[in-house]
Image: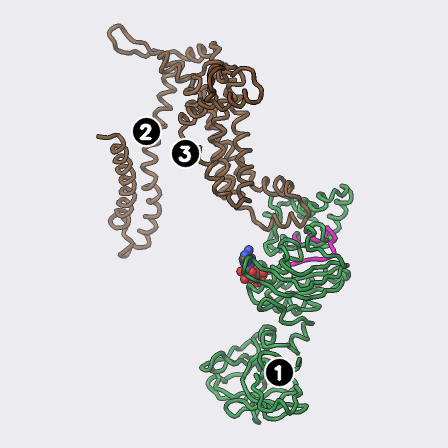
Amino acid sequence: MANLKMTGIAKSYGDVSVLEDINLEIKTGELIVFVGPSGCGKSTLLRMVAGLEKITAGELEIDGVVVNNIPPAERGIAMVFQSYALYPHMTVRENMSFALKLAKKSKEEIEAAVSKVAKILQLEDYLDRLPKALSGGQRQRVAIGRSIVRNPKVYLFDEPLSNLDAALRVATRIEIAQLKESMPESTMIYVTHDQVEAMTLATRIVVLANKGIAQVGTPLELYERPENEFVARFIGSPAMNLWPGEVVATGAQTKVQLADGCEALSNVPTTEADMGLKVKVGVRPEDLRATEGTPVFTGKVDFTELLGELTQIYFDATAGEHVIAKLPGIVHGLRGQNIRLAANPEKVHLFADGRSLLYR
Amino acid sequence: MHPALQGIITILVGVGGCVGYFYLSNQFLDKVLCPPRGKNAGRNINRANIIRPWLFLLPAILALSIYLAYPVIETLRLSLTKRSTLPDGSTAYAWAGLDNYRQMMKEPKFWEALKNNAMWLAVVPALATGFGLLAAQLTDRLKWGNIAKSLIFMPMAISFVGAAVIFKLVYDMRPIEQEQIGILNALYLNFGGEAPIAWLTTPFWNSFLLMAVLVWIQTGFAMVILSAALRGIPEETIEAAIVDGANPFQVFFKIKVPQIKGTIMVVWTTITIVVLKVFDIVFAMTNGQWETQVLANYMYDKLFRSNDWGVGSASAMVIMLLVTPILVWNVRNARREME
Ligand SMILES: Nc1ncnc2c1ncn2[C@@H]1O[C@H](COP(=O)(O)OP(=O)(O)OP(=O)(O)O)[C@@H](O)[C@H]1O
Ligand SMILES: [Mg+2]
């Protein structure tokens, strides 16, 4: 049970500024996921919440109390580290009870808490083992168990699954989702590189970039209505295709003239004043369809990937990045062909100066 | 020739010889003996890799067997024989069984040495390791920690005899009417002592003053090794402990120390072995008088002063017997550390 509030939070190491003016409110029961390119400060922000990193400027409130200068242990947070950070010289049981022992809880209380959590996480058989005698997945569960035992107000996860193999990752992801469901009152902040983790776990995603927050929203908001080019390209894989163009018709629908005689129709509304505006048209690979009519894009297929459920096609990349399209099912013999692609106006995004026209 | 020049030449020849040996023998192996060419290239590479370690170990094995194995056996033999000089000047050895050991057991000085060694063992490794650990932890957190580290490490570079001479000055005593040049007496008088004390001739405590010298030297060694071990502790386990609510003391004693326990034991036992062999300090400072005798100095006394080769060798064997189990254990520990 905890509300978190960040007001103007900034972080710099000496002269190097890493984060600037972060404003964010997190409500009880939310699972917030931080995503962003490597080195954008996700871990740093999380560690500031934990109290492991000093906050250079701004205020961090937990349940209305400014905690900037409160030591980690008194913030009511628990953290799961990427490397699990289990104490190698302690058994699983000792690992899980360490915090409670430090808090001078009674023996019975500790025993009860540990065995309850061990049961939830199916760790009962391993309680007397040392971490080195556990598999990666088991260690991961111990790390999570160690945080649950303390019954914290806020859980912090820093890429907790990145050391697991693909199958285990999926399994553990689902476990975390179920865990979250079983503790609807708990607030969680979760850092990840993995899009799928972000999309499936998050109640809201925070995209960090360029020292600040690029967008905050539910996974679908970020996918369907990205606020800027950065988020548009960052969320979704492969990334959204972008083509430069010029607005030639305005109104409830907007028409954009693209290069090579292509044009795009978008449901993003514009006004008279936007005539001639230089924009970028964005369409996700999965929103492109082969067409006979006016295309938004036409080009020669460079190569294709048959993925079974869909066929991923890459167009000639002479003019920069590959344009990528996903066509449903298995489509043979596209290589070397010229293809015309169109998109539903609903799925066509427009950006000017890097910002979406939707959010003007 | 100037001795310094001689020294430099010796060093050059020695180091050059080593480098030359390793380089040339390696070349010989790769180019002549097992060239990785032709139809047996793969087999040759494997063979070369099997031979190479032995090639590199050879000088060490030879040196060790000449300078270590042979003396041990010879000492054992001497400890079981009686050596006497015949009227014509030649020496004769007669089988003596355990006589030398029996005689040694009867000497109070031997028991004093044994008791003192035990005391050294109880004090020096513990203090040196403890101070080393403390220094390692504290200097790691200081801006000028590296300078502090160098200062603490410096005594390691001083020979035991040199250190003994330095501390002899520290413990020096002058008549009361003169200026004290020993800092201990100077302090003692300054803080209200009535008359200067001849520290080194005051039994019981003088042993501890000798131990201080070794602690002073070995703390640097302990610090360097332990500091490296401390740095090897995963930072995240420490952060996890902080989040779990551990204060700095708890982090140190419950998270850090247990994680480097193996290294602490290695350092401890290494110093223990040094202590068992301690000789120079006692020799240079008190020569075992005033109840400060230790085994190694006792051995020296017997062997080279009384010319009693039998008892001298017997005491050498005793030292070796005491050192061996610790050495074995130490090596095992160090191996386990490396895994
Ligand atoms: N102690 C430090 N001194 C100076 N700069 C630092 C320090 N720690 C981190 N940084 C910088 O802060 C930035 C943010 O680092 P952070 O670890 O938060 O990135 P991240 O988003 O977690 O990246 P990743 O996804 O790779 O884990 C990086 O550019 C890093 O170089
Ligand atoms: Mg990170």
Residue corresponding to mark 3: B157
Residue corresponding to mark 1: A349
Q: Residue at x 75, y 61 (%)?
A: A3
Number of labelled discs? 3
| Residue A143 placement, left or right of B319 | right
3D distance between C-alphas at marks 1 and 3? 72 Å
Residue corresponding to mark 2: B66
Chain A pictured colour = green
In the image, which disc is placed on residue A155?
Answer: none
Q: Residue furthest left?
A: B1
Q: Amino acid at mark 3?
A: Ala
Chain B pictured colour = brown
Q: Nearer the viewer, mark 3 or mark 2?
A: 3
Q: Which residues are magenta?
A: A143-157
Q: Position of residue A203 (x, y in %)?
A: 71, 68
3D distance between C-alphas at marks 2 and 1? 84 Å
Marked residue chain, label 3: B
Q: Position of residue B186 (x, y in %)?
A: 51, 22
**Residue B41 appears in the figure:** yes
